[in-house]
Image (spheres, helix red, strand yellow):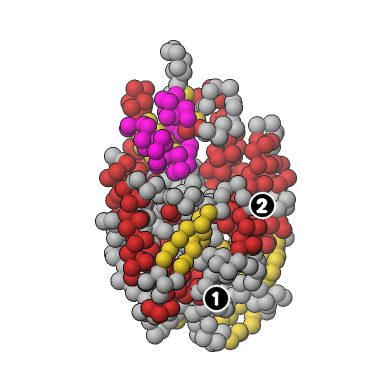
Amino acid sequence: MKTARRVFSLLLVLAMVFALVACGGSSETTDTDSGSKKTTSNAKPNSGSQAGNEDTENTDGTDVSQDTGSGEGPTSTSTITTPVTGTQDLTTNTEMTEDTFEPADHNADDFADKIYTIIQHESIDTPFKYSQDSALGSQVADRIVEVQSKYGCELVFSQIAYGSNFATEMQGLQFADDGGDMVFSSNNAQLRKTLGIGEDSLMVDLLTVDDIINFWDFNKWGNITARETMMSGGKFFGVSPALWIEATPLPFFQVAYNKDLVESFGITDPQEFWENEEWDRDNMMDLISSCYDDTTGMAIWGMTADLGNMIRGTALTTGATVVEIGKIYANGDVDWSLGLMSKDVEEALQWLKNNLSVYAKYFNNGKETWTKWQEDDAFIAGQSVFCLTRPLDIFGEGCISSEVPNFGLITWAGADANTMTGYYENCYSIAIPTFAQSAQQTAYLMYDLFKGLGEIKTYGDVIQHYRDTYFTSDIDVICLFREGARLQYSYWPNGIDNIWASITSSFSTTASIAALLEKVEHTVDTEIETYMIPNTVQLEIYRQNGLIK
């Protein structure tokens, strides 16, 4: 499809704090008969303006000049008062400097002898999901003591178990005398259920406490894609503890490979292809299909992977966004289309279908059991050379990092060398409930609690820790951090998973990928317009204004 023409004004953001001038771009005009749709977004084209006029277009195509000199910041509820201290784009910058931001001094009387409750999924015996008898757990315990001492208060933990209806439980807590002051979620798919559209959220818009937590510090609070997992209605309701080891946001799926098995099969290490900018789909499939051994009591396959995740990875390595934003009109209407309907995606999925038909014996157990969720089990057992898996299954006790002595990471390959892969599905999230004693007081606690633990001072330290602790190659951490910073949030709890599920269920039997994509194109329009468009538009506005990259 042809992209819509976008025109944004020059913008001077926060002249009193930092000079940041952003210039908007333009591309071809959208042909609204080509499949793009129009909806109304909560995000307005001028909602990111600090001063000046913005030229845009009416819905009839005529130019209008809209005065946006209201003095508002990037949202209608908050003005940014702190400079950007990091960069969201980690594709070039992994050597981060230590944050020098400090919020204004707190009023000690506000905190004295108060009890602040932190709601989490985990047992109260594992604060912030860290086992108390682990090194990291000990550092977390020390941090809690430090914060309590600094503020003269007490921090206690309360659990909402995984099996509970999280949204219902949270709704009930808002009527309690001490419902809670902070939420720490290791499963933000549950936490998302508490985010209403507009003003209905049970969580606080974190831009309203930006002067305390320094919201735009991407090094401390996670890249923008990770934060999008906690957006609703164009507002940010959560951040991630990016400086906490094991809680750092990581892309949902990567390819792990057993270096010892690679050597035993005599195939090229995939990272050599990466270094030579030759890591593409054909080379990946050549390696997988070169790995099969059924001559011993335990067969070895080329790869274990879930079909749905292979489909997602293949589609997203085309560079297609789930939703492509076209024209943003002055009244808030938006032209958009489903990026998954592109010709590139169709061709990529056809490639996958053809190759899985030809090379089925090299995957999983050779019987085309494509819905194998516990794909890492076979990999850990030494029954596959490659494994498309989650960071959750890579790091931690009993996982790949502790059970496979010599493993590496590589991305799921795209049509061209080193294209992006994967997506974000879930990140550890910190939020402030609307029924907290004081959002500002909680923000102070957040700021001090989630500084780096132990020797970790910067995001560069986090990257170095992973490099030193788990890996033997710089490419491993590049796949996790540099590549991870440019991925997408999948919006799987908000309808998009239904598209992937429909494609997956018919993938092996369909005669036409084009017909399959056409079948699913309009199945979740309502969900997209409700949950995705306001966020996508607001992020586009921030990009045009230079606040994110």
Circle 1: residue type? Thr
Image coordinates for residue 197, horizontal then vertical, percent: 65, 66
| Count of marks, rendered view | 2
| Upstream in sequence: badge 1 or badge 2 | 1
Identity of the residue drawn at 32% across and 58% down: 142
Q: Which residues are magenta?
A: 377-406
Image coordinates for residue 415, horizontal then vertical, percent: 49, 42
Crowding at label 1, few (<14), some or many (≥20) Cα neighbours within 10 Å? many
Q: Does residue 252 show up magenta in the picture?
A: no
Element type where label 1 sits in the image: loop
| Residue 2 versus residue 302 in the image, above or below | below
Crowding at label 2, few (<14), some or many (≥20) Cα neighbours within 10 Å? some
Identify the image quadrant of residue 276: top left
In depth, the one of 449 and 240 nearer the eye is 449
Residue 208's disc number: none
Residue 495's disc number: 2
Image coordinates for residue 351, horizontal then vertical, percent: 57, 36
Image coordinates for residue 380, horizontal then vertical, percent: 42, 29
Q: Is residue 74 visible?
A: no
Identity of the residue drawn at 36% across and 55% down: 140
From the image, tell me which residue sits under label 1: 75
Circle 2: residue type? Gly
Element type where label 2 sits in the image: loop
Q: Does residue 405 show up magenta in the picture?
A: yes
Identify the image quadrant of residue 337: bottom right
Identity of the residue drawn at 45% across and 13% down: 297
| Residue 308 versus residue 319 in the image, above or below | above
